[in-house]
Amino acid sequence: MRGAVESGFPLLGVAVLGFLCCMRGGQTQDDSGSGRIPGTMPPHLIFILADDQGYGDVGYHGSDIHTPVLDQLAGEGVKLENYYVQPICSPSRSQLMTGRYQIHTGLQHSIIRARQPLCLPPDAPTLAERLQEAGYSTHMVGKWHLGFCRPGCLPTGRGFQSFLGSLTGSGDHFSYQSCDQAEACGFDLHDGERPAWEMSGNYSTTLYIERVKKILRAHDPRKPLFLYLALQAVHTPLQAPNHFLQRYSALDNRPRRLYAAMVSCVDEGVGALVQELRTRGLYQNSVLVYSSDNGGQPLSGGCNWPLRGGKGTYWEGGVRAVGFVHSPLLKRKGTVSKALIHVSDWYPTLLSLAGAPEKDRGQLDGHNVWGAISQGLPCPRTEILFNIDPVSRRPGEADSRTLALNGFGIWDTALRAAIRAGDWKLLTGNVGDGDWVPPQTLPGGPHQWQGMEKRQDQRGKSVWLFNITADPYERSDLADARPEVVKILLARLAEYNQTAVPPRNPPDDHMADPQLHGGVWTPWLGEQGSEGPEGSGEGGKGKAKSSKMRHCKVCKLKALFKKVGSRMQRSSLFF
């Protein structure tokens, strides 16, 4: 079914296919050919993922933050200026690791929370697993955030030979204490599968770069390397070493000053990584990809201006990302690519560069875009399904107006969804606040939002249409003016929805509380094959837990009392 969605347009017909392709100039390209010379060693693949870096938070986009290393690497490589990710952490990471849209892994709704018995489905091989099969050494440093309820969900269980980093979504950059709401906190820094207590006190970006340098120094250059550096910066809490803060002493806005210092630390760290590649003789046969995982959060110092919206929204500020490729292997360097590229494309693209055999192409939503990046060839991607979140519309709450009137009887526009096809972008439902936040209105005092451009077109609306090529800042809603395009894209959403798997959103498991595991966030379920019908980690939990955990009534009572006590404490703050 999924292959039909990508190639056949069975519901819309040949005429509509031509219409959508014309919007992209009829560009097509075979998803084939890595550009690698036969018989040569596959390239070393370095993927750097920054956390919450805004579109406007890099020097070459006009930022007030100094990023000389990133600017130079991007300037000497290919800047991706039509590049998209997802609006929040886990979805972007899941699509990078599997090459599949959220609707095809059951992760449509939200992030994977620390206490959810949920992780990447085991039937979706990860990029690391496929590269390891292809003969690569695979190493991960940084933030995982793709579930850890079972040992097999850990990075070391999903294809990485080594791992240093955090499992949850955020935590203190020095102490590595991470909390899931107020009632569940624990230590979250792991070296392999053990808690790395001895490394506490080191700043996360610095610590991770040092581990990367250690990996590069120990690596045999005759063997291809896949290094995934998923930095915790610049995610909150906003923390940075003092010498980076001093660079921005003139910034009165404290969150922006801390945020800028964190970005500068990332910039310097990337420079150290590239220098180590050169020193170890790995650089000439390397491909480095840099990407943010979602848009910046203005409330936390990030800036997406002049794009609309921010992290957590499907407006451009939430999904259009900083991204570039730097490599001596590029056939065209020092260029800007306007090819439509999505985070799910890295999976088939990097596998193609690695010469890995095609195994799961029919299951992928990503495309091999190396030809478009390296040579400027027509891009195989003409559309992106950002998401369809059925949990945003609870069962039984269908509104005849949003289906029959706004949705033309095709689609319930109260459902949160977004799609881009050619020049057009359609959004439905509650896609997040659509404010434009100029840099001077970033938070910094009692009048923190004064002068901000407030959204004017969201009240009472459930569908928006923009020509993103002509209007990248989403200022001119064309839903009323171009109903024929709205109908086409609503039908496209309905077609994609036919291929969706049920969303997997298990409730939190109190047995995940770190206080039951020595104060550490760690797997709490067994490794038996009882992961529920979708391999999600929910369902069959009773069978999977060890007998000790099943009968630990005292542990359960402790967790319950702790949870109730924390909630009472939070409630007392309001009285």
Image (tube, rainbow, N blue to C red):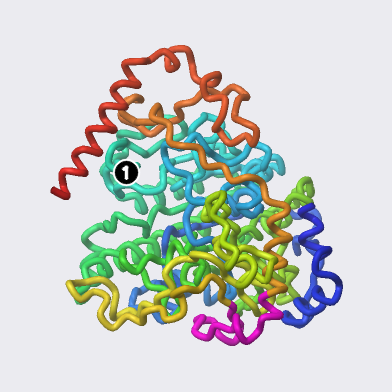
Task: Look at 46% across and 34% down and name the residue there.
Answer: 192
Using the image, determine if residue 163 lies above or below residue 213: above
In the image, residue 537 sits, relative to residue 479, either above or below, namely above
Give yes or no for residue 483 being in the magenta stretch.
Answer: yes
Looking at numbered disc 1 in the image, what kind of residue is underneath it? Gln
Please say whether residue 193 is one of the residues in the magenta stretch. Answer: no
**Residue range (magenta):** 465-486
Q: Is residue 523 left or right of residue 47?
A: left
Q: Position of 331 compared to 177: left or right?
A: right
Within-10-Å neighbours for mark 1: few <14, some 14–19, many 20+ = few
Q: Residue at x 52, y 42 (%)?
A: 505
**Snapshot quadrant of residue 549:** top left
Residue lying at 34% horizontally and 31% vertically, measured from the top left: 514
- The chief SS type of the magenta part is loop
Q: Nearer the viewer, residue 85 or 244?
A: 85
What residue is shown with label 1?
181
- Residue 397 location in percent, x, y? 54, 54
Total numbered badges shown on the rendered structure: 1
